[in-house]
Image (cartoon, rainbow, N blue to C red):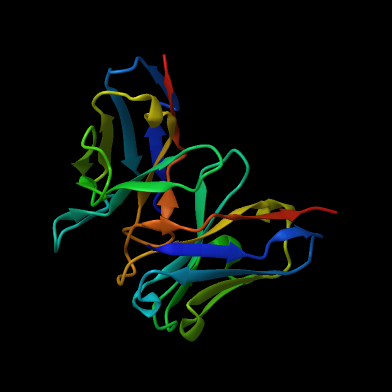
Amino acid sequence: DIVMTQSPDSLAVSLGERATINCKSSQSVLYSSNNKSYLAWYQQKPGQPPKLLIYWASTRESGVPDRISGSGSGTDFTLTISSLQAEDVAIYYCQQYYSTPLTFGPGTTVAVK
Amino acid sequence: QVQLVQSGGGLVNPGGSLRLSCVASGFTFSDYYMNWIRQAPGKGPEWVAYISGSGSTKYYADSGKVRFTISRDNAKNSVFLEMNSLRAADTAVYYCARGSDQSSSPVDCWGQGTLVFVTS
């Protein structure tokens, strides 16, 4: 199984400041034939299901604000919120869909400082 | 709009069984892989199983490989999860969730979730 880890566990950022979350996979999720990393990011708010933000490591889902971006390839990935807004307070999960079982990271809680 | 509406779940004794259902609307159901994903209280999501659009391909996480069965009825735009020999560790909110037309895909739409609580 591919194990996903995230850092930090939590972070507090002032409104308007940058938030950066890291995700690492225990093996590469880059498929060489199409040069795509099979990595997604989700946002979850209390009492709601997760919401897809980013897929293929850096492709923003429709409707996701452009202050949220993803980067990375292979085994190391980053989710960046360039200017934190109050509505971004949530738990963020990375997930690999390169192989079964599909696996999620443990989550990073983002709060306002 | 794309919508997944779940039913089933509830309180069950250890060793018991439950059947979860999920009805889809707003898209061509038979074109999509469908997943069941669960989330224990205070934990991250855990993928449980998926099924291809035709129903011919199914994969399970080890935690449910023998005890759980995923199925679908494309005529009714529905996907199901039959769970047997339930344990306390199966206590979680269970979500049905849409993949894509490929087995390797992110999940872009989730049901509202249904709580399964295994307790004596």
Q: In which quarter of the image is the C terminus of chain B?
A: bottom right
* B68 or B21, nearer to the observer: B21
* A39 or B1, nearer to the observer: B1
**Vertical arrangement, residue B45 with respect to residue A91, above or below:** below
Q: Where is residue A34 in the image (x, y as percent from the top left)?
A: 14, 61
**Vertical arrangement, residue A36 with respect to residue B17, above or below:** above
Report the label total: 0
| Residue found at the very far front of the displayed protein | B1
What residue appears at the point 27 percent right and 54 percent down from the top-left corner?
A38
Q: Is residue A110 visible in this depiction of the protein?
A: yes
* B107 or A76, nearer to the observer: B107
* B75 to the left or right of A28: right
* A110 to the left or right of B31: right
Among the 4 quarters of the image, the one containing residue A102: bottom left
* B114 to the left or right of B61: right
Q: Where is residue A75 in the image (x, y as percent from the top left)?
A: 26, 43
Q: Where is residue B114 in the image (x, y as percent from the top left)?
A: 62, 56
Among the 4 quarters of the image, the one containing residue B16: bottom right
Among the 4 quarters of the image, the one containing residue A91: top left
Q: Is residue B61 visible in this depiction of the protein?
A: no
* B2 to the left or right of B40: left
Q: Position of residue B57 (x, y in %)?
A: 42, 79
Q: Quadrant of the N terminus of chain B?
A: bottom left
**Vertical arrangement, residue A80 with respect to residue B3, above or below:** above
What residue appears at the point 28 percent right and 29 percent down from the top-left corner?
A81
